Each structure stands twice: as structure tokens, then as C-alpha cells.
Image (spheres, coloured by chain):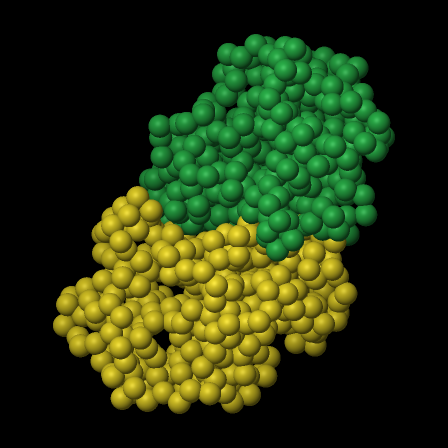
Chain colours: A green, B yellow
């Protein structure tokens, strides 16, 4: 049904350290990673900029973020558009840049994500990813919905909360050697996870990703011209989006991430690769339960068994399916609109063999899964060298 | 530099009447026009939905609008993403759907716009299209910035406010026979325009477009397959975006719409047509001054002479360059995210020869110009049969 007309590759990346509060403004953070990515690709301009940002409406009083950042970077005139998919917003920017190059409309397109959550009430604004009429109106937030799913999972499959510990542990282990991670200096133990504050039962502090500031960007071009910009281009082998009912209670089985399963299946088909070919999987570990359900949806484990990959140490850098290889959303940080672009930068580092202490051995094929809201939107991208 | 790989056509349209306050919810309005467009194209599903919406964050407490509307329409599973470009948001949705089809990623893609401005403080939320740090922080709104531009224009070129009257008059004349226009029953005279309340000097009530609710959608597919859905497909001959400095005071000449000029020039080049070939031009008449400056930027008049096209009656349905042929933003209404999709529906009606009393004789080539903010983003689309 689909056919890709033109192969697309990534030829430059830019990221700044995730911080609790970055002293730079939103526009300065965006311009900084745009310049870093342009420097990495060795170009002094681009054709198009697609910006992922979810919260600037409320937190910075700013709706025109793409044009704002194009201007802050000094790129008067270029195409600049803003794209969103709730908490999967960064991946939506990546897909738009992919569209722009694959369609022939742009030769050099940037996908950029930026989020500044340190000002205003980010938790309140984040809740707008849910259904305003039937969920947030009854007090639900992304935290409370994920706590509900976690409890439902524990009840349905008869497992204790401790089966989720290693998702957080592995993320924090990997973050320690990532200079861009929010928790790069934090040594986390299982005892700390078990003793951590319960936010909404059964969800503990270490089961959730932190509020933070961050920005990251990647530059895309036609694969046939990629070597003009880098010796090691990485191909985007496929890009796919699917959705589910927005309201959790409308879903036949809230523990099945239908959108994730559907978008991943499409992504495998378009890339013509199999799940078992993947060397690493950047999962959407905004919450421990999402890592677990994400692994199940993609097929790495049966329903109710995703946690076993964590307890059996299969998700570490040398495991059968490494996840969150630079710390993931939990420990690198989850500056919403920027998150999938950080993950893309990290995948590029992995596939170029430049991941240093975080290197997955012989990484050649990687997948990125981004989740919008409590599972209602999913974007899957597969990358290869 | 660019090359279009695959021709894209529109094969279905859906619109509902613009109202001061639509009793339907945002999701219901969106689902309604999606179903109307699908019915028009004779399809019972689509691959991808791109939604333009600017204000639901504040006015409906809803950030996940694309997935919300896909679900409300019963289309569980399809791709759904949200795209924005401030007040040009509807055109950004059109460009994304164009990308999706041109890249081969979707066979049937919908561009849908929806806005519900009847609840909350729309004027405050709209101001976020400006620079939060240097414009809105000093009290500027879209109204005040357009009043500034209007005054600057009058001072620079030595013309009185009455030179703008006919932009509003023509829009209202055309709206009277458009069943979807907000002011379809309003008979407006020059005397009424001259006597209308001054909002911010010199800008009068009739120089501004109204706050309103509305939704519209179009379905795109590959031109080669378009006749499977309609006997009269309309081609999107080109799509183009350009930006300018966000802050008006940073621009060398605030009266020159650089982004509009640049995006239109690109659109003419890509479509391989000349301005004088156009049979009609849907201009962004959110304010009279924007119509005037838009006509100048595209080349229909020299700088300082755009108003002459209005005073000399060249912009009517039988003029040399008809604008706002179904009432424009001023009299059909300007439900922000939906506006460019209403304009696209109207262009399709014109090019199919189905515009009824609003028909431009022998219309074969039309252009749509959408402006984001006070001129900082511009999208141009050219359509032909």
C-alpha cells in the first residue's frame, strides 16, 4: 500500500545537556542545537525546520515556536513549521522532516525538539494530552493514568511492584556515562528505588521521568547525497504512526498498546526487517509501566511478561534487547518535545559506533518508539547503517 | 533545487457553516467535516489525518487534538498528527497532507482545520502568535500590531483610512451568497464601514475578522489515482513556506511581507505559472492592511499601491484579480486553524465550476496565501485543473 520514493538519511546531530533548569530561553536553546547540528553536518543553512514543542503555549506564552527558533538561529526566510503529538511530539517533528526530504520538497530538513518545563505548571499543561472532556475533567493527569495502568497490570498478572525496579535501575546506570543526562552524576541502587516516595500508588518517584529543560536536533537529507555531509550517514529505514482511542477506558484492553503495536508492525514491514534483527530499542520509558507495555506491544515479550526482560537483565547494554541506552526518559530526562530527538541523536551515536561507554556492541539496526499521551498515539522509526 | 516526485490532487471537501458559537464540541465539529469530506470522496477510511488547530490548548484544555478527532470520527488506528503555524495553521495542515501523499507515505491523507473560539479568552491566546519576550510582554496583540502596520502604511504612503473600505465591502458582498459564511445575511455598505467602531486607531471593526467557530477538511491523493474518487480532481500545483523575523520591529521594512513574497515566488516557480495566469487569489484578509500588503507582496501591485486594486474594483468576482471570493476571513469568518481549509474548499468549488453565485468566470488557476502572526510565516499553495 505504501512505497517510499526516496531514501532519507541523517547527516548531523546536535544536543545540549538536559538540566533541571536551563538558564537559556526557549529560543536560545533551540538555536543552539540547530547550530550544533548544522556544524556537525558542515552546512551553513538548511531548507526547512520542523519543531516539536508541547508546552510553550502555557509555559512561555509562545505559540509561534518554529518561526521563533528559525529567527533566533539567524535563518530568516527558511520554511519553519510546528508539529505535535502530545508527549510523542519530538517524533512527529522527525516524521515531518522525513516527509519533507522524501517528498522532494526539501534537500536539508531539520527535526528539532525543545522544551522548557522549569517555568509554570508543567504537570497541569501535560495533562492536556488526555481527553479534556472525560479524563482531565475528572482530575486525571498523565501521572494518575500511568499509576492506574500500573495497578491494573499488577492486579491482572499478579506481580508485585518490584518487578519494575530494573527499568529504572538500567536507565540510571546508562545515564551515568551520558554527558547530556540530567542524572549523570547520580548513583542509583535497587534499595533507593524501593525506598522512593510513592507519588500515586503504586507509582513511585523512580517509576516516573523528571520535569526538565532540553533541546536536540537532527539534520536529514537524501541518502544518495548524504556522504557529501558525513562519512557515516545513518538511514531512516522506516517511519510510521498509529493511534488508539484517546480515552483509556474506551480501549478493549488498556494494557495493550494497540497504537504502538500497529505502528511498529508497519515500521517493520516498510523497513523489511524483523524485530529480532534489532540491536537496540529506545523505548518510551516515561513511566516504568510504559517500558513494560512497550516491549510487549512490539513483540519482545508476551502480554504480562514484559517485566521479565528487566528482571532477567535482558535490557542492559549487553542484553538481548538493550533499551534506554543513554539513560532513557527516566534518567537522561524527558523534556517532552525534545525527547525523541535526543533518542535519535543517541541512536546515531550507537550506529556510528561513537557511543563510548554506552556503546551497544556491533549496533547496526535500532528502533525508536514514541508514545503520545497514555498510549493513544505512537510513532515508530527504524534506523540502520 | 526542489523537485516534486509525485503530483497530488484534492478529491473531497467538507465544511460546516461558520458560527459565532457552534453548539457542537471541538471533536464533534472535526469529526463532522472529516465525515463530509470522506463522503464527498466516496471513501470509508483514510490513511492519515493532519489537524490544524491553534487555540485548543487554552480554550478547550486539549493538546492532543489530532488523535481526539481521529477517534471521534471512529477511525481508530489511522495516523493522526497536529501541525501549527500560528494564524496560518490550516495551511500547515494542508502542506503536511501534501507531504504525506507526495512522499508515498499515505495514499489518502486528510488536511483538517478546526477552531472553537467561542469559549475562553481567544484574543489573549491569539497574541501568543507574536514574540512573547519582546511583543506580547509589552501589551501587543495581533489587533494592536495590525493597527500599527495600518497607521504606518497610511503615514508612509500618505493615504486616508477610507482607501481600505472596499476590502471589507467586497468580502461582505461575497459572503452573502456563501451558505457557510458567518455574515451570510448581513448587508454591509460603505457608510456602515466608515461609521464602525474604532477598535485600535486607525483599525475599525470592519477592518478586522471576527472570532468564530468553524471546521473544514479536504482529502488528498495521488493525481494518477484521483479519478477513482471524483470526476473533477483539482491538482495542488505547488506548496511553499517561508518565514520572516518574528518581531515586527526587527524587519528592515515592516510594510513589506517578505515571507509572503518569498513563499509566493517559490510557489510560482514550482508550479511553473505566472502571477498573471491566476484567476483568483484567496488572500489572508484577517485585517484590511494584510489584504493590501499581501497583494503587494505577491506582485499584483507595487509597494504602497495595493489599496488601488480595491478602490478601482479590481478585486471583485469579475475584477482582474478576485479575492475573498466566498467572503474571506472577514465575512466568511476566520476560525484560525480551519481558515485555510475553508479557503481550499472554496478554491475547489471555484475550479470545479460549482461556486454558484460566487463563481469567478472560467476559473482554472487559483492561489491561496496564508499568513502566520503579523507576517512572520507565510504559506502559499497554487491549485489548478
Can the viewer see residue B342 in this picture?
A: no
In the figure, is residue B200 to the left or right of B102? left
Q: Name the spot of residue B298 as percent of width and height, x first.
A: 36, 66
Q: Name the spot of residue B17 as percent of width and height, x first.
A: 55, 77
Q: Which of B167/B225 is in front?
A: B167
Tally the numbered discs: 0
Residue displayed at 78% across by 38% down: A255
Q: Quadrant of the C terminus of chain A?
A: top right
In this view, A156 is above or below B84? above
In the figure, is residue A298 to the left or right of B105? right
Residue displayed at 27% across by 70% down: B199
In this view, A373 is above or below B238? above
Residue displayed at 56% across by 47% down: A128
Q: Quadrant of residue B72?
A: bottom right
Residue displayed at 35% across by 84% down: B169
Q: Name the spot of residue A288 as percent of width and height, x first.
A: 68, 27
In the figure, is residue B103 to the left or right of A62? right
In the figure, is residue A130 to the left or right of B330? right
Q: Which of A193/A227 is in front?
A: A193
Can the viewer see residue B38 in this picture?
A: yes
In this view, B141 is above or below B334? above
Q: Which of A153/B381 is in front?
A: A153
Q: Which of A163/B92 is in front?
A: A163
Amino acid at each position: 500500500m505504501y512505497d517510499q520514493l526516496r531514501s532519507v538519511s541523517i547527516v548531523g546531530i546536535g544536543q545540549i545537556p538536559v538540566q533541571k533548569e536551563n538558564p537559556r530561553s526557549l529560543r536560545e536553546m533551540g538555536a543552539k542545537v540547530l547550530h550544533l547540528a548544522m556544524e556537525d553536518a558542515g552546512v551553513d543553512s538548511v531548507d526547512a525546520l520542523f519543531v516539536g514543542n508541547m508546552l510553550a503555549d502555557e509555559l512561555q506564552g509562545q505559540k509561534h515556536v518554529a518561526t521563533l527558533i528559525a529567527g533566533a538561529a539567524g535563518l530568516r526566510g527558511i520554511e519553519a513549521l510546528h508539529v505535535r503529538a502530545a508527549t510523542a511530539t519530538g517524533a512527529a517533528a522527525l516524521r515531518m522532516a522525513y516527509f519533507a526530504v522524501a517528498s522532494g520538497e526539501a534537500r536539508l530538513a531539520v527535526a528539532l525538539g525543545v522544551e522548557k518545563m522549569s517555568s509554570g505548571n508543567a504537570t497541569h499543561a501535560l495533562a492536556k494530552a488526555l481527553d479534556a472532556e472525560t479524563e482531565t475533567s475528572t482530575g486525571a493527569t498523565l501521572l494518575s493514568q500511568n499509576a492506574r495502568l500500573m495497578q491494573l497490570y499488577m492486579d491482572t498478572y499478579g506481580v508485585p511492584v518490584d518487578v519494575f525496579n530494573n527499568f529504572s535501575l538500567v536507565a540510571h546506570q546508562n545515564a551515568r556515562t551520558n554527558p547530556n543526562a540530567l542524572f549523570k552524576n547520580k548513583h542509583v541502587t535497587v534499595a533507593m528505588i524501593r525506598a522512593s516516595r510513592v507519588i500515586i500508588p503504586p507509582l513511585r518517584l523512580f517509576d516516573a521521568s523528571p520535569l526538565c529543560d532540553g533541546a536536540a536536533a537532527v539534520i536529514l537529507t537524501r541518502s544518495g547525497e548524504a556522504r557529501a555531509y558525513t562519512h557515516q550517514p545513518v538511514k531512516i529505514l522506516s517511519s510510521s504512526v498509529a493511534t488508539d482511542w484517546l480515552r483509556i477506558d474506551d480501549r478493549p484492553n488498556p494494557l495493550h498498546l494497540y497504537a504502538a503495536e500497529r505502528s511498529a508492525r508497519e515500521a517493520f514491514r516498510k523497513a523489511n526487517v524483523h524485530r529480532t534483527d534489532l540491536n537496540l530499542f529506545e523505548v518510551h520509558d516515561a513511566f516504568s509501566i510504559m517500558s513494560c507495555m512497550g516491549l510487549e506491544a512490539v513483540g519482545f515479550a508476551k502480554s504480562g511478561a514484559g517485566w521479565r526482560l528487566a528482571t532477567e537483565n535482558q535490557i542492559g547494554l549487553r542484553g538481548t534487547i538493550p533499551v534506554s541506552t543513554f539513560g532513557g526518559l527516566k534518567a537522561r530526562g524527558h523534556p517532552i518535545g525534545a525527547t525523541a530527538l535526543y533518542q535519535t541523536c543517541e541512536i546515531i551515536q550507537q550506529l556510528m559506533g561513537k557511543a563510548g561507554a554506552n556503546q551497544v556492541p556491533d549496533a547496526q539496526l535500532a528502533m525508536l518508539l514514541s508514545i503520545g499521551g497514555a498510549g493513544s498515539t505512537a510513532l515508530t522509526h527504524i534506523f540502520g547503517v
